Image (cartoon, rainbow, N blue to C red):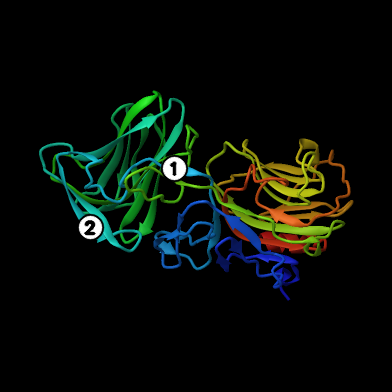
Amino acid sequence: MAIEDNASLALIPSGYKSGKLYSVIPDNGNGDFTHTRGSTATRVNAGGLIETMAIDVPRLDYPLVDGVVQSCPALLLEPLRRNIALHSGDINNAVWLKQRITVTDNSVVSPDGNVSGDLIIGDGTGTSYFYDGFSVVSGTTYTISIFAKQADRKIFYINNFTSAGSIYFDLELGEIDTAATGTFSGGKIVYYGNGWYRCSVQFTATITGNNNIGFVGDTYNGNMFYVWGAQIEDGGSGVDADYISSYIPTTTGSVTRNADECNSAGTTAEFNDTESSFFVEIQGFEDGNLNRYIVITDGAGSPYTNTIGILYRNDGQLRVLHNGLDFADAICIVDVDQTVNHKIAVRYKENDMAVYIDGVSQTIRTSFVYQTVSGLDQLKFSQPNNTSNAFYGKVKQLLVFKTALSDSDLATLTS
């Protein structure tokens, strides 16, 4: 029998409907999560295509590795984000200002499987580009992205025409050709298959007012390239958007994708106050401005006793917490790269605490003092008593056991 078969609650993202994410264990519905999101949102589906999901429907996102869709999805949980680039899939629209180019609509199959990618053709007389002007707030970080595909020219770049900055992408090699300069930072290029790359860069505004961002091809050579899905992303109301999130399509106005909330799985029958084990496989986002929690709790308020939790802190730490959310309640504290996939397991039992990360046993803090907990009855991707400091990232699996697993079992689960 596999270790996972002994779980009292097991989330291996597979079944869902509007407002509900099903756990595979138990089979009586006790372990199912309530999922809400007050807007539509996109994911990569099992066919490797970008697909729009309805309001409140959980997103099971299938990872792409070198443009090839993988077989096992992850639950995608994202914060509120807004795309302020209008007509994101229609560069021929008049909102996009153009210099020395013509645009041929619907020329190639785009990453959503429709024939909606636009062909950009330079006239050969100079630098050819299209651009968008948008209002920025000084000190706020925006993420700029677009899907681009090589036609006859391979170099594509994003340029800040207002506050100098640029980054160059090689659409043949799938590499950043010249790193971000000036007001730009954090460039990335990700392959989505069929020749399409999502090219992105971060931009921190140095002014408050209008800013022009341009998308440019090779110069002076009558260049051609395909584009689709432009995104100028912020967090709404001057909130930073310092990582690239899922595509948010727009038409005549900016579009806000609301935050995912996934909470309240379980009853007292799925948890053991005296001893238990807790396993997650998760990947966070690059956004380091927030604390993000996954907790087993009784749902009560401050001081948040009766809680076992995993915290991704805004300083890069991973903290495992027992009977509260403060520093003194931390079983262990380690620095991790929150943006890569980690397997984390926790065992709690008086005089028998353990934490394993990616197969390695972690040091339990000598100052930690075990205290009893009671009334554990739910699992949440947020703080215990509300939806603040929600965990945002990708969740590949989650398991709860009503027994204290052995060190060898914890090592096996996390390896």
Up the image or down, 263 lies above or below 383; here it is: below
Left or right: 41, with 132 as reference point: right
Left or right: 39, with 358 as reference point: left
Residue 70 % position (x, y):
48, 65
> Alpha-carbon distance for marks 2 and 1?
25 Å
Left or right: 361, with 374 as reference point: left
Residue 318 % position (x, y):
67, 44
Q: Amino acid at mark 2?
A: Asn
Q: Are marks 2 and 1 in contact (CB under 8 Å)?
A: no
Eye-nearest disc, 2 or 1: 1
Residue 414 % position (x, y):
67, 59
First-in-chain label (2 vs 1) = 1
User: How many badges with numbers are in the image?
Assistant: 2
Under tag 2, what secondary structure? strand
Up the image or down, 125 lies above or below 75; here it is: above
Residue drawn 57% across the image and 36% down it: 289
Residue nearer the viewer, 306 or 386: 386
Residue extending furthest toward the bottom: 1
According to the picture, the residue beneath numbered tag 2 turns out to be: 106
The answer to whether residue 342 of the structure is visible from this angle is no
Residue nearer the viewer, 232 or 277: 232
The answer to whether residue 148 of the structure is visible from this angle is yes
Q: Amino acid at mark 1?
A: Arg
Under tag 1, what secondary structure? strand
Residue nearer the viewer, 211 or 244: 211
Q: Residues within 10 Å of mark 2 (few under 14, many from 20)?
A: some
Which image quarter holds the C terminus? bottom right
Residue extending furthest toward the top: 207
According to the picture, the residue beneath numbered tag 1 turns out to be: 82
Residue 169 % position (x, y):
32, 44
Q: Residues within 10 Å of mark 1 (few under 14, many from 20)?
A: many
